[in-house]
Amino acid sequence: DSGVTQTPKHLITATGQRVTLRCSPRSGDLSVYWYQQSLDQGLQFLIQYYNGEERAKGNILERFSAQQFPDLHSELNLSSLELGDSALYFCASSVELGGTQYFGPGTRLLVL
Amino acid sequence: EDKVVQSPLSLVVHEGDTVTLNCSYEVTNFRSLLWYKQEKKAPTFLFMLTSSGIEKKSGRLSSILDKKELFSILNITATQTGDSAVYLCAVTSLNYGGSQGNLIFGKGTKLSVKP
């Protein structure tokens, strides 16, 4: 158990819908990262937050957005969902920028 | 474009064998290389390497980084069925995403250890 928690574990929804994934980092970690893992693309970096501020963006679609709250938990919002958005979404946290990242158990999203 | 390439993509061995997994990278302003083990779900951290030529060791696993030749290897000795997993290599770069610490992953090596 890495200490990073994610909810929900599984999510099934329909195309066009909107979902919110939640992440709580390890105690003391200020940086939160979101990754998407699909069968064909592997693990892809989406976005990073540090102490409430967005610090970097990777391969994140405009339909996706995220934020980190004052208590340091983070939410990833996915809207206008498409079949291709079906994937495992991981959250990771680290104490500092560039520190070792510890991954949560992931949320498996299935868009039908 | 920054990239991380792992080989082989998959590997089948028998218990007790020794395996070597490879990771090569091309990144701008390399900062660190990390190895993760992914079984059913979340990647679990194994090693972080930042200095060339210094071996990191944990039990039967060890890893070394060659910053001149831009590669790393992960060795597993006396393999056990519990070592069956996908092993992921990732690098961090100061430039990727405009910050530091964001991981660029390879596609992974799927290791299957048969009894």
Image (cartoon, coloured by chain):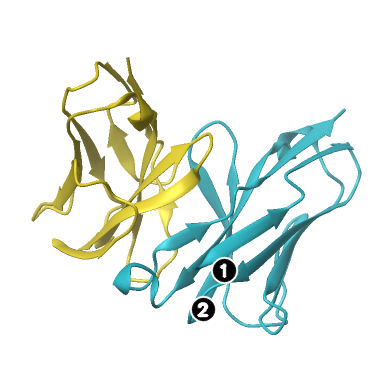
Which is more foreground, mark 1 or mark 2? 2
Q: Relative to A109, is B43 above or below?
A: below
Task: Using the image as rendered, state which of residue A1 and residue B104 is in the foreground.
Answer: B104
Q: Is residue B56 visible?
A: no
Crowd around label 2: few <14 · some 14–19 · many ≥20 (10 Å): some
Q: Residue at x 30, y 36 (%)?
A: A6
Task: Using the image as rendered, state which of residue B80 and residue A90 is in the foreground.
Answer: A90
Q: Which chain can be seen in yellow? A: A
Residue pointed to by mark 1: B33
Q: Amino acid at mark 1?
A: Leu
Q: Position of residue B69 (x, y in %)?
A: 72, 79
Residue pointed to by mark 2: B30
Q: Colour of chain B?
A: cyan
Task: Using the image as rendered, state which of residue B1 and residue B78 is in the foreground.
Answer: B1
Crowd around label 1: few <14 · some 14–19 · many ≥20 (10 Å): many
1 and 2 marks in contact (CB < 8 Å)? yes
The quadrant of the image that shows the C terminus of chain B is top right
Relative side of A42 to B115, left or right: left
Q: Element at badge 2? A: strand
Q: Residue at x 60, y 48 (%)?
A: B107
Q: Amino acid at mark 2?
A: Phe
